[in-house]
Amino acid sequence: MKKILIILTGIILLVSIPVVIFFTGQQQELRSKAAPATTLSIQPASPTAAVGDTIVWKILINTAENKVTSVKVSLLFDQTKFESLSITNGALAPKIISQGTVGVGTATITVAAESTAKPISGQGEIAVLRLKAIGGSTTPVAVQFAPDTVAYDIGERSVNVITSTQPGSITITGGDQGGTIPTVTPMTTPISTPSASSPTPTPTTKPLENLVNEPATPSALTFTVDTEATRGGKPLVHGTSPKGATITIVIHATPPQTQVVTANAEGKWEAVPTTNLRSGTYTIVVTALHPTTGATETVSSSFTIAGGIGGGEEAVGDAIPETGSTETTIFLLCIGIGMVLFGSVPFIKKI
């Protein structure tokens, strides 16, 4: 009788423990895969600054229900109003995956949580941007997030959990503020009326062929993805925009690929992905930042790579190793239970 009870107990343990662990793992997975709800915002240290001042901008996060492992912060601003100084991580993101870099009208950094056991959670500061004010303004000047800004959750390492971003703005006093309306001097010289005998002036025009061949200065953002222009998974992206504009190209791969180029004097620009793209369809987002007005224009499209080459980087969200898996735990528990049961056989025989 005792043998039967011990055997039944062992069978119940072998069946019930894995079932309990399985459903526990399912509940943990559902909890970890919370719907995207993270928001980002930019807050200057003060609402105003003077030309020559160093302005400190706080990059803030509110994760809501998400447990964020890493965030790529990419920022755009008017290069005629601000000079880039530095971008560093904040207190809520103690690790740096990609060192902060600043350029003309751009700044970017990729930060991360201490570990998956201690993800970025709640509200706080994940990055700090420092800019020098170099041009005055009559209206607030903005610093905004670029399209390639992304955040990854523990349970959604390939899904951007950011639902909205809020730019920051500041008014810069002093310097050349621009936007001044020039004073118009009244015309006092009388306008002569041509007499009937005066010859009709012949308008000066350019030959039609000159007008056709004369290059026009682009005023709007356009682009084309030429998948045949380069080998493998590196298509050529080229287009037109206002001359001197800062062009940010984001290809939504895993991880997203971002490049920043500047349009030349004819408003033309081009770029090639830094790593090969695998076969598949991709979304591309191109943003142009006007060099003088600070206005932005965004155009998006999609393209397909056939016969792309692997070898792309791992997803940013995979940079922090996971602490373990449910399958491993179940396997080890089954081995342990088996050892206990087999170890009790000699004891049962003695009884």
Image: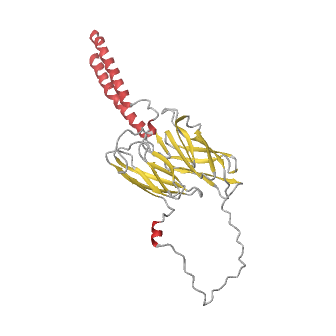
Rendered-image quadrant of the N terminus: top left
Vertically, is 202 above or below 98? below
Position of residue 64 in the picture relative to residue 128 (left or right)? left
Is residue 344 at least partly visible in the picture? yes
Position of residue 49 in the picture relative to residue 222 (left or right)? right
Q: Position of residue 328 (x, y in %)?
A: 36, 28
For residue 154, which quarter of the picture? top left
Position of residue 222 in the picture relative to residue 85 (left or right)? left
Q: Position of residue 317 (x, y in %)?
A: 45, 38
Q: Nearer the viewer, residue 37 or 343?
A: 37
Q: Residue furthest top?
A: 350
The residue sitting at 35% across, 43% down in the picture is 278
Q: How is the image coloured?
A: secondary structure
Q: Nearer the viewer, residue 68 or 307?
A: 307
Vertically, is 142 above or below 111? below
Q: Position of residue 26 (x, y in %)?
A: 38, 37
The residue sitting at 39% across, 43% down in the picture is 276
